[in-house]
């Protein structure tokens, strides 16, 4: 299969080992000495037991081995994959040792995050009095309630880590504020220490949390403990009591999904576990009635239950996940958040992998086809267990942006193959195959963190803010269309709708498409050194007789100066563009340096240096449905989005047929 | 100039738990399991089918059944050639929502000719309890299908492999019919199956 790039290479190396191993009987391997335990004997501690069933190891037809991982999830894998799994297990056990070593030095729960003290205030004017208590960072949602304790912990880390004369530095609070200058100095020191501490936590978590520590680390890093502590101790129980015996739409759906969550799992598919899972989901549906229950939450809750092994903890981590870590409304009645995240991902794809993004657009691939599952199940359904766990480790520590990083990494790793595919289905299966076989978490996370480039949370937030209104409008429109009597709705979709809406009566034309693309002229990267950085924005839609003319404006992005210049084509220019476009198409290739033009400001602004033979039909195929249906206004809005993503179509002329 | 596309896109819709995934798997892989996971978003399988001595590839898309997932429909429904509506003959509500699923599909996929867009209705799980727990009668279902423009109707059981092949054969046939009709309207389409765009010598506007 064409799915693997780097990962496969490593797998091949280990293939011999597994073949040898397969000769024997059941093989059991403890992944890390000291973390002993067995699935049944100690339910609170998940065992790290890799069981490759050697007695009937290879299915003769599919040549596959059944592997059960440390959390009891079974998978059918190829010999090469199982070698890879074992290699990864080896690495995991090394990481486990590292964590143990760090724990030995720093003590248990050393990974508690420490809020950075804000230094700005003191630099521009130290506050008088005991102002040395570092203020919690306002944007860090987890810091608010635990700052004093955590700060002390931070300074204790100085004592432990600085290993020297400064051992007593953390002691006296009075000493800290003796003079403003000394206070400032200490603040700096504390800030450095906090920063170092937090980046160490980040580094260690990215390496992977050993299964033994996972429950504690997840609860601590996600802020679930804090959330739990902020509520009355019997909060969860009281929620359950409230819901006892009630039947709502949510509970009906939950009951429908329980057995379909991870069927066949040795522990999750038992009555006791299903009851726990049900209680968690029901309690949440009652806590947040606007969300209720959404399919996908069942997988998330089940994973939490398997890892944390405590119903109440799982409930709190789920709560924190849905209410703080992920975008709100991700699971709400209209999946608003999910829509927004998908659009943000589309934007990011265009920014980080423009070629791929353009290609996907051309073949009519909507990222939602695969990412709905990724975002709603947080990859729990898509990835092998260990990979998903590693991702969740980082998710709890760093927040939702890791989802984007990993999604982008998946696309990046598959870019060469996707570029060759012209069918939406093929892309979907390629990605599904890839994710289901992503056993090497290190390889994928390495790409996600090191090769995607900078992806600050602020830019994601900005994109979310930008996309949210558009999504809301779109969802509203959909509701509007649904509210109309079904027959009317159908009529408005129907062939002569445009004519009818204008009161001209039904058209007799056999063609159902009101406007047909007769040319999509240019789709180009723009010259001037900043290739690939320019993008076009829709600036005008005009109806000229039987033609609908769309003009684009170039909006610079990427450079420091944001340039916006009008690049409307004059009719002669358009004619020229069209001529060249068709010529290019006839030649079936690319022509370079064909065309340059003056912008309104008189500067030679746009020089199209690459012409792609973009077939009209591709546009047709991918967007025809939209054109059929919608009114001019929605059509314009959608088209703008199309162009946006396509990354620079210059002139599109539609003619009425 | 007319394109030769042999890929048929079929969408399976219906309430959660009516057996969409099972039907698809029974048809494509010829096996039944009661261990399917709940579908999130969508998933698909393909199968080569012979329809009137023409070999076509059927791409069957299985979707999530919870109502809120309907808002994601546009991406999944785009370019569909046939839509399969599934309900559970043992649950009244799943039959009642067929209307909703149909309208939703027509609105979001906005096919070129909604009045004649091919639908097929499947009443699934007829095997349960030897048919004693059944609440939606065949007559009622057929009446509904007739009222919506003579939609073909099949009673199936994915578990017992009852009528599944027949149903999908009909689906393929109708999808193909829809396909060829579409060709007349959109003559300039290009094979999206990985073929090079067809060359054209002049703009046709």
Image (cartoon, helix red, strand yellow):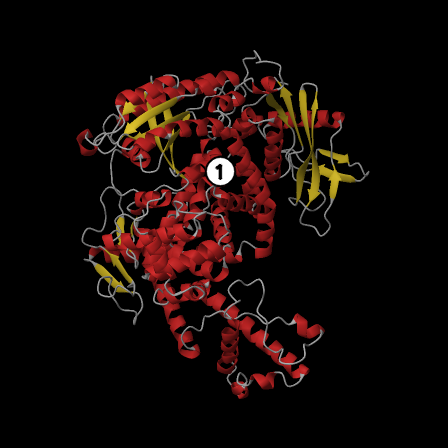
Horizontal and vertical percent position of residue A211: 35, 64
Report which residue position mark 1 lands on: A420
**A165 shown above or below A144:** below
Horizontal and vertical percent position of residue A637: 61, 34
Instruction: Return the residue nearer the eye: A43 or A547.
Output: A43
Question: Which residue ends up furthest to the bottom in the rendered image?
Answer: A165
Labels in figure, total: 1
Q: Give me the residue at 41% from left, 30% from top.
A: B101
Q: Give me the residue at 57% from left, 44% from top.
A: A468
Quarter of the image where one finds residue A129: bottom right
Q: Left of A328 or right of it: where is A70?
A: left
Horizontal and vertical percent position of residue A141: 53, 62
Horizontal and vertical percent position of residue A146: 50, 70
Q: Is residue A319 visible?
A: yes
Instruction: Return the residue nearer the eye: A86 or A247.
Output: A247
Quarter of the image where one finds residue A106: bottom left
Instruction: Return the residue nearer the eye: A49 or A607.
Output: A49
Q: Residues within 10 Å of mark 1 (few under 14, many from 20)?
A: few
Quarter of the image where one finds residue A178: bottom right
């Amino acid at each position: 299969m064409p799915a693997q790039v780097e990962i496969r290479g490593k797998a091949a190396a280990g293939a011999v080992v597994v073949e040898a191993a397969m000769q024997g009987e059941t093989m059991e391997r403890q992944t890390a000495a000291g973390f002993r335990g067995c699935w049944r004997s100690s339910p609170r501690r998940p065992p790290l037991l890799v069981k490759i069933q050697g007695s009937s190891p290879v299915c003769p037809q599919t040549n596959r081995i059944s592997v059960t991982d440390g959390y009891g999830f079974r998978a059918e894998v190829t010999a090469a994959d199982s070698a890879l799994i074992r290699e990864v297990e080896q690495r995991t056990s090394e990481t486990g040792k590292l964590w143990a070593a760090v724990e030995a030095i720093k003590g248990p729960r050393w990974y508690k995050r420490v809020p950075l003290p804000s230094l700005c205030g003191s630099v521009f004017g130290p506050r008088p009095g005991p102002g040395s208590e570092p203020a919690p960072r306002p944007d860090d949602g987890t810091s608010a309630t635990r700052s004093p304790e955590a700060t002390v912990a931070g300074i204790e880390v100085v004592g432990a880590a600085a290993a020297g004369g400064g051992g007593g530095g953390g002691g006296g609070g009075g000493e800290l504020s003796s003079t403003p200058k000394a206070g400032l100095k200490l603040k700096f020191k504390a800030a450095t220490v906090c920063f170092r501490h937090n980046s160490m936590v980040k580094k260690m978590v990215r390496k992977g949390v050993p299964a033994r520590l996972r429950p504690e680390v997840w609860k601590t890093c996600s802020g679930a403990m804090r959330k739990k502590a902020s509520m009355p101790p019997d909060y969860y129980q009281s929620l359950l009591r409230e819901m006892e015996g009630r039947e709502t739409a949510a509970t009906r759906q939950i009951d429908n999904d329980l057995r379909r969550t991870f069927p066949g799992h040795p522990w999750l598919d038992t009555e006791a576990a299903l009851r726990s899972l049900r209680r968690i989901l029901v309690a949440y549906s009652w806590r947040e009635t606007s969300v209720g229950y959404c399919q996908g939450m069942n997988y998330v809750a089940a994973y939490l239950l398997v890892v944390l092994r405590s119903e109440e903890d799982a409930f709190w981590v789920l709560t924190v996940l849905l209410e703080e870590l992920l975008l709100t409304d991700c699971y709400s009645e209209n999946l608003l958040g999910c829509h927004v995240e998908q659009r943000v991902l589309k934007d990011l794809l265009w920014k980080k992998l423009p070629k791929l993004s353009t290609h996907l657009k051309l073949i009519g691939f909507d990222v939602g086809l695969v990412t709905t599952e990724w975002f709603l199940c947080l990859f729990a359904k898509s990835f092998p267990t260990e990979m998903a766990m590693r991702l969740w480790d980082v998710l709890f520590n760093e927040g939702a942006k890791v989802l984007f990083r990993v999604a982008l990494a998946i696309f990046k790793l598959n870019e060469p193959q996707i570029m060759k595919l012209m069918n939406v289905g093929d892309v979907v299966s390629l990605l599904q195959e890839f994710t289901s076989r992503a056993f090497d978490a290190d390889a994928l996370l390495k790409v996600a963190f090191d090769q995607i480039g900078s992806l600050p949370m602020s830019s994601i937030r900005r994109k979310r803010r930008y996309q949210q209104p558009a999504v809301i409008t779109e969802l509203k429109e959909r509701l509007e269309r649904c509210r109309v009597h079904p027959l009317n709705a159908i009529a408005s979709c129907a062939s002569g709708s445009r004519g009818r809406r204008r009161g001209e009566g039904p058209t007799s034309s056999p063609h159902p498409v009101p406007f047909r693309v007769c040319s999509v002229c240019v789709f180009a990267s723009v010259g001037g050194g900043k290739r690939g950085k320019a993008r076009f924005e829709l600036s005008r839609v005009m109806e000229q007789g039987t033609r609908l003319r769309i003009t684009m404006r170039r909006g610079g992005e990427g450079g420091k100066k944001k340039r916006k210049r009008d690049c409307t084509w004059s009719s002669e220019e358009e004619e020229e563009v069209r001529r060249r476009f068709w010529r290019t198409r006839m030649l079936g290739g690319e022509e370079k340096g064909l065309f340059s033009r003056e912008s309104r400001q008189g500067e030679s602004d746009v020089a199209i240096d690459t012409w792609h033979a973009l077939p009209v039909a591709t546009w047709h195929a991918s967007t025809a449905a939209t054109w059929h249906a919608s009114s001019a206004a929605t059509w314009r809005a959608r088209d703008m989005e199309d162009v946006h993503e396509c990354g620079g179509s210059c002139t599109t002329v539609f003619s009425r047929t | 100039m007319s394109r030769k596309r042999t890929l048929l896109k079929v969408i399976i819709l219906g309430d959660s738990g009516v057996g969409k995934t099972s039907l698809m798997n029974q048809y494509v892989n010829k096996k039944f399991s009661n261990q399917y996971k709940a579908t999130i978003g969508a998933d698909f399988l393909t199968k080569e089918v012979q329809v009137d001595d023409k070999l076509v590839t059927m791409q069957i898309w299985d979707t999530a059944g919870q109502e809120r997932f309907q808002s994601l429909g546009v991406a999944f429904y785009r370019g569909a050639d046939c839509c399969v509506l599934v309900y559970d003959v043992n649950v009244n509500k799943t039959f009642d929502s067929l209307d909703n699923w149909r309208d939703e599909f027509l609105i979001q996929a906005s096919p070129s000719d909604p009045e004649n867009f091919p639908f097929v209705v499947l009443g699934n799980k007829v095997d349960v309890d030897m048919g004693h727990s059944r609440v939606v009668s065949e007559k009622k279902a057929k009446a509904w299908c007739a009222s919506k423009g003579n939609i073909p109707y099949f009673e199936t059981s994915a578990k017992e492999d009852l009528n599944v092949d027949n149903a999908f054969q009909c689906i393929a046939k109708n999808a193909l019919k829809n396909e060829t009709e579409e060709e007349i309207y959109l003559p300039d389409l290009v094979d999206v199956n990985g073929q090079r765009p067809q060359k054209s010598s002049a703009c046709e506007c």
